[in-house]
Image (tube, rainbow, N blue to C red):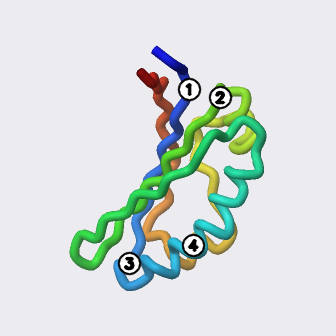
Amino acid sequence: MKNKTITRIWHGRVRAADADAYLEYVAATGVADYQNTAGNLGVEILRRVDGDVCHFWTVTKWTDVASIRKFAGEDYEKARYYDEDAKYLLEFEPSVIHCETFEF
Protein backbone atom coordinates (compact mmCIF):
# COMPACT_ATOMS: atom_id res chain seq x y z
CA MET A 1 0.00 0.00 0.00
CA LYS A 2 1.44 3.37 -1.05
CA ASN A 3 -0.76 5.99 0.64
CA LYS A 4 -3.92 6.41 2.65
CA THR A 5 -5.90 9.56 1.91
CA ILE A 6 -9.45 10.75 2.45
CA THR A 7 -11.87 11.11 -0.47
CA ARG A 8 -14.78 13.56 -0.16
CA ILE A 9 -17.74 13.03 -2.51
CA TRP A 10 -20.55 15.50 -3.08
CA HIS A 11 -23.55 14.91 -5.34
CA GLY A 12 -25.88 17.43 -6.94
CA ARG A 13 -28.49 17.56 -9.71
CA VAL A 14 -29.17 20.31 -12.25
CA ARG A 15 -31.33 20.60 -15.34
CA ALA A 16 -29.55 18.94 -18.26
CA ALA A 17 -29.87 22.18 -20.21
CA ASP A 18 -27.72 23.88 -17.52
CA ALA A 19 -25.01 21.19 -17.39
CA ASP A 20 -22.29 23.09 -19.27
CA ALA A 21 -22.95 26.38 -17.50
CA TYR A 22 -22.95 24.64 -14.12
CA LEU A 23 -19.66 22.90 -14.87
CA GLU A 24 -18.04 26.26 -15.64
CA TYR A 25 -19.56 27.75 -12.48
CA VAL A 26 -18.27 24.88 -10.31
CA ALA A 27 -14.81 25.21 -11.82
CA ALA A 28 -14.73 28.91 -10.93
CA THR A 29 -16.04 28.44 -7.38
CA GLY A 30 -15.70 25.04 -5.74
CA VAL A 31 -12.78 23.69 -7.76
CA ALA A 32 -10.82 26.91 -7.26
CA ASP A 33 -11.46 26.76 -3.50
CA TYR A 34 -10.50 23.08 -3.31
CA GLN A 35 -7.24 23.70 -5.14
CA ASN A 36 -6.39 26.67 -2.92
CA THR A 37 -6.86 24.70 0.31
CA ALA A 38 -3.74 23.23 1.88
CA GLY A 39 -3.99 19.45 1.98
CA ASN A 40 -6.07 19.07 -1.17
CA LEU A 41 -4.49 16.46 -3.42
CA GLY A 42 -6.80 16.70 -6.41
CA VAL A 43 -10.28 17.30 -7.80
CA GLU A 44 -12.36 15.32 -10.28
CA ILE A 45 -15.84 16.11 -11.50
CA LEU A 46 -18.06 13.33 -12.76
CA ARG A 47 -21.21 14.13 -14.66
CA ARG A 48 -23.99 12.04 -16.17
CA VAL A 49 -27.03 13.23 -18.10
CA ASP A 50 -30.16 11.23 -17.33
CA GLY A 51 -33.03 12.58 -19.40
CA ASP A 52 -33.76 16.16 -18.37
CA VAL A 53 -31.47 15.97 -15.33
CA CYS A 54 -27.70 16.02 -15.05
CA HIS A 55 -25.99 14.49 -12.02
CA PHE A 56 -22.69 15.90 -10.80
CA TRP A 57 -20.27 14.38 -8.35
CA THR A 58 -17.25 16.26 -7.11
CA VAL A 59 -14.60 13.85 -5.91
CA THR A 60 -11.74 15.38 -3.99
CA LYS A 61 -8.70 13.79 -2.37
CA TRP A 62 -7.26 15.08 0.89
CA THR A 63 -4.29 14.34 3.10
CA ASP A 64 -6.45 14.13 6.22
CA VAL A 65 -9.67 15.31 7.90
CA ALA A 66 -7.94 18.41 9.27
CA SER A 67 -7.38 19.53 5.67
CA ILE A 68 -11.03 18.96 4.80
CA ARG A 69 -12.04 21.13 7.76
CA LYS A 70 -9.98 23.98 6.27
CA PHE A 71 -12.26 23.83 3.23
CA ALA A 72 -15.61 22.82 4.74
CA GLY A 73 -15.47 24.11 8.31
CA GLU A 74 -15.70 22.26 11.60
CA ASP A 75 -18.87 20.38 10.57
CA TYR A 76 -17.04 18.90 7.59
CA GLU A 77 -19.74 16.27 6.90
CA LYS A 78 -22.10 19.05 5.74
CA ALA A 79 -22.15 19.99 2.08
CA ARG A 80 -20.72 23.41 1.33
CA TYR A 81 -22.76 25.60 -1.01
CA TYR A 82 -22.17 28.91 -2.78
CA ASP A 83 -24.53 31.85 -3.28
CA GLU A 84 -25.37 31.17 -6.91
CA ASP A 85 -25.92 27.42 -6.44
CA ALA A 86 -29.64 28.14 -6.12
CA LYS A 87 -29.59 29.30 -9.76
CA TYR A 88 -28.67 25.76 -10.88
CA LEU A 89 -29.27 23.06 -8.28
CA LEU A 90 -32.58 21.22 -8.15
CA GLU A 91 -32.07 20.42 -4.46
CA PHE A 92 -29.52 20.92 -1.70
CA GLU A 93 -28.32 17.62 -0.33
CA PRO A 94 -27.33 18.27 3.28
CA SER A 95 -24.24 16.09 3.52
CA VAL A 96 -21.31 14.58 1.68
CA ILE A 97 -19.57 11.27 2.18
CA HIS A 98 -15.97 10.65 3.15
CA CYS A 99 -14.06 7.44 2.46
CA GLU A 100 -10.63 6.27 3.44
CA THR A 101 -8.83 5.75 0.16
CA PHE A 102 -5.96 3.32 -0.34
CA GLU A 103 -3.54 3.29 -3.26
CA PHE A 104 -1.58 0.20 -4.15
Point 49% across, 47% down: residue = 59
Contact between marks 4 and 1 (CB within 8 A): the answer is: no
Q: Which residue is labeled 3 in the image?
A: 15
Tell me if 14 is positioned left or right of 3 in this view. Answer: left
Q: Quadrant of the N terminus?
A: top left
**Between discs 4 and 1, the one toward the N terminus:** 1
Q: Residues under labels 4 and 1: Cα distance?
A: 31 Å
The kind of residue on which mark 4 rests is Ala
Tell me if 20 is positioned left or right of 16 in this view. Answer: right
Between disc 4 and disc 1, the foreground one is 1
Point 31% across, 73% down: residue = 53
Contact between marks 4 and 3 (CB within 8 A): the answer is: no
The kind of residue on which mark 1 rests is Thr
Q: Name above or below for residue 60 compared with residue 18.
A: above
Q: Which residue is labeled 1 in the image?
A: 5
Q: Where, by quadrant of the figure, is residue 62 drawn?
A: top right
